[in-house]
Amino acid sequence: MASLCHFPSSPTPRSFSKKLLSPLSRSHYRPLLLRNPNPSWNLHRSCSRLSRFSSSFAASTPAPSGVAESTSLGDITRPDFPILHQEVNGIKLVYLDNAATSQKPSSVIEALDEYYQSYNSNVHRGIHSLSLKATDKYEEARNKVADFVNASESREIVFTRNATEAINLVAYSWGISNLKPGDEILLTIAEHHSAIVPWQFVAQKTGATLKYVGLTEEEVPDIKQLKELLSNKTKIVVVHHVSNVLGSQLPIEDIVVWSHKVGAKVLVDACQSVPHMVVDVQKLGADFLVASSHKMCGPTGIGFLYGKSELLSCMPPFLGGGEMIADVFNDYSTYAEPPSRFEAGTPAIAEAIGLGAAIDYLSNIGMQRIHDYEKELANYLYDRLMSVPNVHIYGPAPSVATHRAPLCSFNVGNVHPTDIATLVNNLHGVAIRSGHHCAQPLHRTLRIDASARASLHFYNTKEEVDIFIQALKEAIDILT
């Protein structure tokens, strides 16, 4: 059935101050181990120095407790993640890069395997048994997403390639159609590039203006300033729920109320919140919300957009092609109702089914249980990291009133984060992230080029945090 809103067929619009003082900062981020003309000599030298620490490290670091000896959620769930049971350079893997992507439980891998082995077929287009089963599983996954974030109906969930595409969908569909010269798009300086760049494109095409909320002395987005910047010129507010660098959480419900008072829509980047806490879109009140499957124990290659049905119904298509149409004539087309209108072509069928399996897995544990455990882990990580000399952790300190996400972005004195990440991985099997974490404007505001980041999920343990801290101390000793 054609939408009540018809749209003609048309082409889819498509000096830094203070730097880190590490020598690496002055050599374009080349790792310290590679700065010498003879890289193998550097690695041999570092490994030789490390040998003095290895025996004491093994003796002083207790092995993680078995399931029978511990009731921690990390110990209970680790057997479900095959990838975690491997060695890196002969040492057990400690995976602390979950803010970049999470690992996948066996049930998700099995769901992907079952689709390809048992009912691989296209969806919505066939009446044979395989197509019918694939369609049922695909739409069942959409229902699971809707229930998971408490959307009022499943048609408010649009499957996209990832959260980045979901933001681009809103920018090019709603943004191009609704913004004009003089209008304002309000963001915080702490947004991910995926939430900034699409709106830069839209601003250039429409003449709208981008405005940014800065940071407080506590290194969190200035909510008071955000409220003051809102005006009748503000048409959309684009904000993260949880920062992938600062670990801070924004009061989305308040931001929505303030924004709606001036007639502005709100788009929430929930990539770092949906995998870690209960997220209720009706309670938040946001107009749009995006998240990525691969950060919530699901497959890569799929994300989703939540949009209020009344908004989606009057938004033009993002991409043209099969599946998103009602009728196609020689010189114009009419379009399907959402969500089909925004899912042109063959979708990521297996990935959607895998996302549904991931949601089943998370729901069986319970998101509140995950959140409570990760809050404990987050505080433990912060406290242990603060015990390391010359460490600066970005974002707020945890307190009764301030909850930090289970991640810490940090720098250590004059040591470059890439050197740290290289050594803790190569010499201790600890996987952390280094770089700007797709948040260059934020790093410029913090007056740094890059940072290291350790990020946890519910399958991590305090013992792994201890291993990371010991590895970090030894890396710093080598590098200094």
Image (spheres, rainbow, N blue to C red):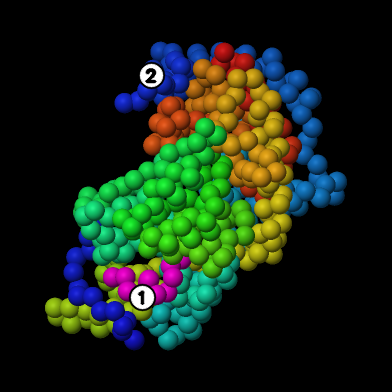
The range drawn in magenta is 305-316
The answer to whether residue 294 is visible is no
User: Local crowd at mark 2 within 10 Å, few (<14), some, or many (≥20)?
Assistant: few
Q: Position of residue 349 (x, y in %)?
A: 45, 68
Q: Give above or below for 91 relative to 232.
A: above
Position of residue 127 in the picture relative to residue 341 (left or right): right
Q: Residue, x 56% and y 65% (percent of image)?
A: 283
**Which quarter shows the N terminus?**
bottom left
Q: Quadrant of residue 29?
A: top left
Position of residue 284 in the picture relative to residue 260 (left or right): right
Task: Identify the residue under disc 1.
Answer: 313
- The three-letter code of the residue at mark 1 reads Ser
Q: Position of residue 269 (x, y in %)?
A: 46, 54
Q: Position of residue 348 (x, y in %)?
A: 43, 65
Q: Please tell me which residue lies in front, 384 or 256.
A: 256
Q: Give above or below for 447 relative to 262.
A: above
- The three-letter code of the residue at mark 2 reads Ser
Task: Identify the residue under disc 2.
Answer: 27
Position of residue 42 in the picture relative to residue 208 (left or right): right
Q: Is residue 262 rendered magenta in the image?
A: no
User: Local crowd at mark 1 within 10 Å, few (<14), some, or many (≥20)?
Assistant: many
Q: Position of residue 383 (x, y in %)?
A: 69, 32
Q: Please tell me which residue lies in front, 103 or 20.
A: 20
Q: Residue, x 43% and y 27% (percent of image)?
A: 447
Q: Please tell me which residue lies in front, 285 or 409.
A: 285
Q: Seen from this angle, which residue lies furthest right?
A: 69
How far, Cα to Cα, is label 1 from label 2? Answer: 52 Å
Indicate which disc, 1 or 2, sits on the residue closer to the N terminus.
Answer: 2
